[in-house]
Amino acid sequence: MNDPNSKKDKLVIAIDGPAAAGKGTLARRIAQHYGLRFLDTGALYRAVALAMLQQGLDPDDAEAAAQMARNLDITLLEDPALRELTTGEAASKVARHPSVRAALLDFQRCFAANAPTGAVLDGRDIGTVVLPEADVKLFITASAEVRARRRWLELGGEASGVPFEEVLQQVLERDARDAERSTAPMKPAADAHLLDTTELDIDAAFQAARRIIDARLNS
Ligand code: CDP
């Protein structure tokens, strides 16, 4: 957790929000601009899920998933299959197990605590559970259609062979699973700034986030 004495020298930013809201792109831009380290926490859940799928294990098996999370193979973070729809779906299933979340918690907190100038973490429960003392909390949203369209284009659009409707359906199912789970559900922290990017491109979203962060730094 943050040491209150070092808070002045460090900037910790929590970014949460639903699937494909553009958190990752925005978080990377923010990290680069303010010279902070960046952690995509969703990739950790995706890596646990991918390991389960590769070994033919059921993502609903809490015991096996927790075991996988405790011995996470970090080479999976570079695996292109990490970004596939099936991996995202399985990630939201393994993410429901409290034992999996507990196994990944320390890693996330240590990452923020050990970053020399501070860090940006993006996920679903960063502002509420992982870093409740973060200096700035952003909750990024956009309409489900816009988010599904962005994800579909990321996957290759028409050329991917994946119908847009399938991506939309998956985004909706994943949001419901993430928001309705009992442990660390996706929700904005009480002190989070909401940023709706339905009508914003990445530059406009970055400028809006920058205004919020700069206002906090100058307060
Ligand atoms: O990039 P995208 O928005 O598709 O999702 P992600 O950030 O890669 O996260 C994949 C899944 O991991 C989510 O649907 C959540 O179920 C889970 N997750 C979580 O539970 N807590 C986090 N801090 C980050 C991700």
Image (cartoon, grey):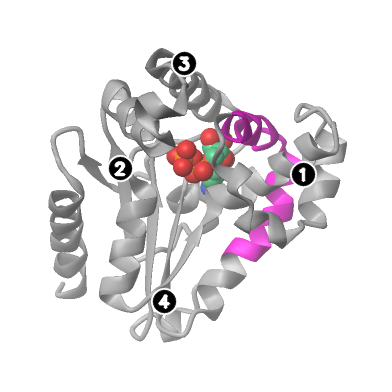
Q: Nearer the viewer, mark 3 or mark 4?
A: 3
Mark 3–mark 2 Cα distance, whole angstroms, equals 23 Å
Q: Residue at x 37, y 40 (%)?
A: 188
Number of numbered tags placed on the structure image: 4
Mark 1 lies on residue:
51
The residue under label 3 is: 166
Q: Can you give x and y, in whole percent of width and height, for residue 12 in the image?
A: 39, 69
The residue wearing badge 4 is 118
Q: Amino acid at mark 3?
A: Glu
The residue that mark 2 highlights is 140
Mark found first going from the N terminus, 3 or 1: 1
- What is the quadrant of the N terminus in the image? bottom right
Please tell me the numbered disc located at residue 31: none
Q: Secondary structure at mark 4?
A: strand
Determine contact: label 2, label 4, CB under 8 Å. no
Q: Secondary structure at mark 2?
A: strand
Magenta part of the protein: which range?
A: 86-108
Q: Earlier in the sequence, mark 1 or mark 2?
A: 1
The reply to whether discs 3 and 2 touch (Cβ–Cβ < 8 Å) is: no
